[in-house]
Amino acid sequence: MGSVVTLIGLASSDSDGTIASYVWSQTAGPAVTLTPTMPSGANVSFTAPSVLADTVLTFRLVVTDNLGATSAPDFENVTVRPLTAGQAPISGRITFARIPTFRTANGLNFAGTTQQPARGITVEIVNAGTNSIVSSGTTDSDGFYFLIATPNTTAFVRARAELVKSGALPNWNIRVQADATISSTQQTARGTDFNSGSGSMQNLAIQSGWDTVAGTYNSPRDAAPFAILDTVYRAITKLVVLNPSINLPNLIVDWAPENVGNQTFFSVSSAGPKIVLAGEANVDTDEYDAQVIAHEFGHFIEWRFGRSDSIGGPHTLGDRLDPRLAWGEGFGYWFAGVVNDDTLMIDTFGPQQSQSGGFDIETVFRNPGWFSESSVWTILWDLYDPANDDVASVGLAPIWAILTGPLRDSSAMTTIFTFITALKQANPGLVSQIDSVVGSQSIVAATIDDFGSTETNNAGVPSTLPVYASIGQGGGPLIVPSTRDFGTGNKLGNRHFVKMIVASPRTVRITANAAVAGQDPDVQIFKAGLQVISLSCTPTPTPPQVCGESGGNEDFNATLSGGTYVLEVYECNNAGCAGDTPTPADTTITVTVQ
Amino acid sequence: MPNLFLPVALALSLMVAPATAATQKIGKPAAVSGMTLALRSGEKIGAPVDVYYQHLAPGAASADPSLKLTIIPRLAGKLSVQLVPDSSVSIVYGGAPMTLQKASASGVYNRLLSVRRNGTTPATIRALVHVDLGDSSFFSVFVIPADAASADAARLMKSGSSQTVKKPARQL
């Protein structure tokens, strides 16, 4: 008894539209009050009544879609058990300080701070004398918790900055902790000591640490990890609608006040996936920048459920980028817009967190084309946009189906080409709408294919096309450009793709020779996005026998199974390799396959 | 759209058009010949600018070395530049010590700063650069060696790592 119970209807779905309303009602058992009351939300809660024996309460859910159609009722039974002797029920609400961002001014709006429910986080009752955990559980969608403590004991409530759901799917395990090089401790917030008596209510309001008078953080920034998790929670609720059985791999979110400003990114190592968020006050803090958090979480989702071939690296509006990077970053900003139901991307920074960068993914783009992250976010948003203020309205589910289906298996790299090609194939009735949206970003749409073979937008530099050159056994010499027209590292033209079809398993000899002595051509071989062999000889690759570099040139034997491969060919300095002596320069690389 | 502008604090020394032509190569403009391109810190979408610096020897034995700083926008917009305070470096501009600089420009930003190191270990200056494009705005942090010795140390570190780090790490 006394426990707050939440009934979750969010996993309801409609095959030809969206769920417009939910109606929960009780059909059996002692009467309880469902909150919120009518109109019901997707999720409702009630406080379990006092009972003397196990008692079943039954609830009924009916949903109505956007066309007015009503579902058959679904029923849920909840068993309430009585407390036993020696138990002290402790309940309460965990909230965190949410500092909103200004939308029409700059920076964080400290005066607008509100306490928001810490949803889905782990909460513990800890014995204050022994520091041992007495009981633990999870807050509901309104931040409420119910736990059992030992009577008449001094204890405190501890909130852990983690979202953990195990057992029946959906599952997730996302923790905010300081980087191992700092303290490797998980972020927590501690309440004050109390005597459990025969039971009590213990709320915990986690504070931001901001001193409004002094205009600085002068106490621990305890709310920050919970603000981060709140954005992640919001993302998960969207994903559960798309996939009620979603199973997220463990994710560490590395945040601490010591995290250097502007050092925010997603990466994957042997230790697993990790999001790092900036925490440096007066330079760049990201804990309240929901769009930045959702963007990085989008990279995690793309990595787990879709496929990312992005090479990462710095990028700015207007850059002509490697198309894999353009796709990945554009996807990330679109995903952030979906998660937050907001097209305005705000990133606060500066002294006293008083400044902002920002752009609207529905309206802001520069230098459009297949190499532009802003074209990707514009196209994706226009295709998704439920407001339907443009010609297309594909919706979220069809986009998700492509991201998690055909895009994973494409022989070509993940770019706007692969996504649009698959989307058109899966939605033949929407082809004209899709073409209109894609064409508005200076991308050839009507004849688009995975490899962009009919693309005509060369960004003003003829050597950027074709997007993929082709070579077969006995092919070549093929002259491949590696240029720096738009910068180096991850920009359009630094690297060039070559499509290679291997009809049956065999060993091929691949050579790549620089046009100028002293330059360093490299070749990577990919199959469906997976790097099969790196033909870069510094450091010596494994197995070492594939390395045949001589004076910077490459000469390799590679044993390959049948299928379509992509060779990524580049001059190493143009591609941002560290330490090579030649400075970046436009050049060509001669490739042969025997 | 947030109004991202800070008051103009310092006058411009040079105005030019940004490099926006589609076929214009992103290389070193003549105005920054002899200067070094500063490293952009971080992987978030950043300010469309290029930051160059050059360390100059002091004009007199008792003077501090100087740092020439030039910021060139890639897209037309208004620049705002701040230097992140650091206890290891004192920066002087116009004869006055500064812990926080703000300056705005609508073209190229040029400054000649006096830099005094408060210690012997290599130090860096971080420049927070913000660009307002009218319909959007972006910021980046650029890392600049505080003096020639720090720049030499950075070059040695880069050279020393070249045998083991050839491919840039993937961070998204």
Image (tube, coloured by chain):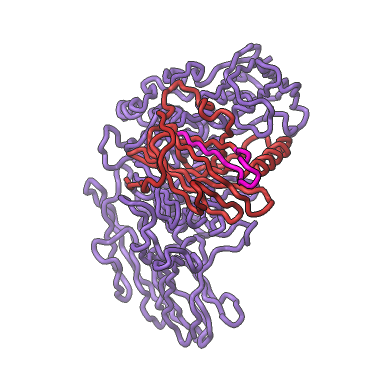
Please tell me in which quadrant of the rendered image residue A79 appears. bottom left
Residue at (56% x, 29% y) in the render: A488
Q: Position of residue A305 (x, y in %)?
A: 50, 43
Examine the rendering and report whether any part of residue A249 can be seen. Answer: no
Residue at (63% x, 49% y) in the render: B123
Q: Is A364 located above or below residue A103 in the figure?
A: above
Q: Is A405 located above or below residue A464 in the figure?
A: below
User: What residue span does the magenta drawing correspond to?
Assistant: B55-72
Q: Would you say residue B30 sits in the magenta stretch?
A: no
Examine the rendering and report whether any part of residue A145 can be seen. Answer: yes
Residue at (51% x, 73% y) in the render: A190
Q: Residue furthest right?
A: A545
Q: Is residue A478 left or right of residue A121?
A: right
Please tell me in which quadrant of the rendered image residue A331 appears. top left
Quadrant in which the N terminus of chain A is drawn: bottom left
Instruction: Please tell me how many numbered marks the rendered image carries.
Output: 0
Colour assigned to chain B in the rendering is red
Please tell me in which quadrant of the rendered image residue A120 appears. bottom left
Q: Nearer the viewer, residue B6 or A315?
A: B6
Q: Residue furthest left?
A: A68
Q: Position of residue B16 (x, y in %)?
A: 41, 29
Quadrant in which the C terminus of chain A is drawn: top right
Q: Which chain is purple?
A: A
Q: Would you say residue B68 sits in the magenta stretch?
A: yes
Q: Position of residue A239 (x, y in %)?
A: 42, 49
Q: Is residue B15 left or right of residue B152?
A: left
Q: Nearer the viewer, residue A140 or A308?
A: A308
Q: Is A475 located above or below residue A311 in the figure?
A: above
Q: Position of residue A355 (x, y in %)?
A: 40, 51
Q: Is A231 located above or below residue A428 in the figure?
A: below
